[in-house]
Image (spheres, rainbow, N blue to C red):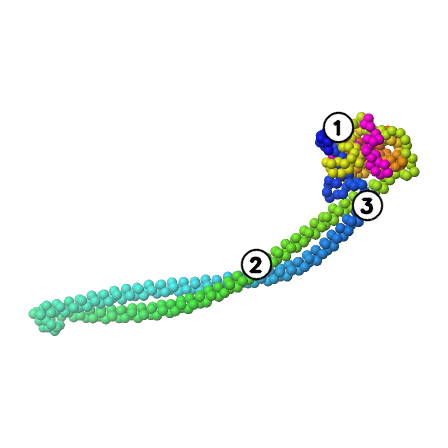
Amino acid sequence: MHFKKFLRRAAAFVTVCALNTGIIMSYSPIGAEDLTVDEIKDKISQIQEENAARREEIERIDGDISEQKENLEKVNALLGEQKQLVDYYNNLVYYKKQDITEVEGKIADLELDIDELDSQIKTAEKDIEELEAQNADNLEKFAQIIRTMYTTGNTDMFGVLAGSTDFYQLMVSSEVIGNITEKNLEFMNALKKDIEKLSSDKKQLETDKANLQASVEKLDSEKQTLLDEQTELEGLLYDSASAADSYKQDYDKYQSAIDSLENQQSDLSYLISVSEADIDAYEEQIKEIIKQQTNPDKVYQEGDWIWPVPGRSYISCYFGWDYELGRWHKGVDIGDAGIYGDYIRASKAGTVIVAESSYIPGYSYGMYVVVDHGGGYTSTYAHMSAVNVYVGQEVAQGDVLGCVGNTGYSTGPHLHFEIRLNGEPQDPFGYVEIA
Ligand SMILES: [Zn+2]
């Protein structure tokens, strides 16, 4: 492309005619290639074949999906069973722990009882000790009396009595000795009994303690059994949880396989819907080709062609190969600033064979008019904002066909003007000058 031409185009990018291009990838735009009706029909059947293959593929994937779903259901059932087992073992472990806690409570109670017995035993021991001390004390007192008897020279009680020099002394001595010995003996006997009683109590306490200790040992062994059972249950719980994990992994694997297959299907469905739009576009193209077919009997009217938008001279896109958009441009684009709404005039007298005022925004010619000039010549006026003629209408050169617009595949107000001979686009500047 010449640099100047590039600059012109860059400056006028808003009015670049985007007719007949393939730049929207999903759509094979109408007239992107110069195809005959048969060629277009071939393309349509090619797309239909591709879509049939895609539909088959979707069905095949349906089979794969059902297979994976069966796997998923199987593994889901196994997973459910395993989860129930996990719950079951969890419960058993829970109750086992409660049993252990209960046994531990019993042991703690017994140990408290044992402590209590211990303290009772200690008290008894202390009491015994005290009594024995009193006993020793008494013995000492008794010994003192005996010693006193010795120091007074009498070796026995009768001696003490016999050695008394007067009645009073005798009275005192015998009374004292008698009292002391009798009370002592009494007291010592009582002490002895107390000590015996306490010793027997202590023995009983020790027997009780031994019994309690035996119970504790029994409970300890029960607790050990329960702990062993707990360990075993925890092992089973671990095994079932591991199995559940493994089933869960399988489940996730099947689920992601299903997701992936469904994605493949939706990709294929997307391609089908896109290419169905292509088919619609091709069918539209066939209709246009058929519509534009000229009357072979119509005689070409000699004489000059005139510029369709008098006073407008800015060419935003010339006829020919457009390197920028990579396609053949089949006419010239006249895109002066302020051109919107200008009258479009018939370049030459003829019969209107297309007067299209319905269109899909963003696609194709928009509103457009084709005039048959005879001898296989036609002129086309596209992207109009209004159409003022009807099919079959005879128009004279310069008659208003409609107004400049921006309908169809157009990025700014302009007139796309074509001249064709037997359907073949011609360079309009081979026929007409800017005026
Ligand atoms: Zn154009």
Q: Nearer the viewer, residue 395 or 208?
A: 395
Amino acid residing under circle 1: Ala
Disc 2 versus disc 3: nearer the observer: 3
Mark 1 sits near ligand 1, with its Cβ under 8 Å away: no
CB under 8 Å between discs 1 and 3? no
Q: Residues within 10 Å of mark 1 (few under 14, many from 20)?
A: few
Residue at the spot 48% in from the left edge and 62% down from the top edge: 97
Q: Is residue 149 magenta?
A: no
Q: Is residue 315 above or below residue 124?
A: above
Q: Tell which circle, 2 or 3, labels the residue nearer the N-terminal end.
A: 3
Disc 2 to disc 1: CB gap under 8 Å: no
The label on residue 231 is none
In this figure, which residue is indicated by the disc labeled 1?
337
Q: Where does label 3 land, which residue?
A: 39
Residue positioned most to the left: 165
Mark 2: which amino acid? Answer: Asp
The residue that appears at 13% across and 68% down in the rendered structure is 147
Residue 415 on the magenta span? yes
Q: Earlier in the sequence, mark 1 or mark 3?
A: 3
Alpha carbon separation for disc pair 2 and 1: 71 Å
Q: How far across and how far down the image is residue 408, in percent? A: 77, 37
- Give how far apart the Cα atoms at labels 2 and 3 are: 59 Å
The residue at 73%/40% (across/down) is: 23
Q: Which residue is mark 2?
A: 245
The magenta segment: 411-435
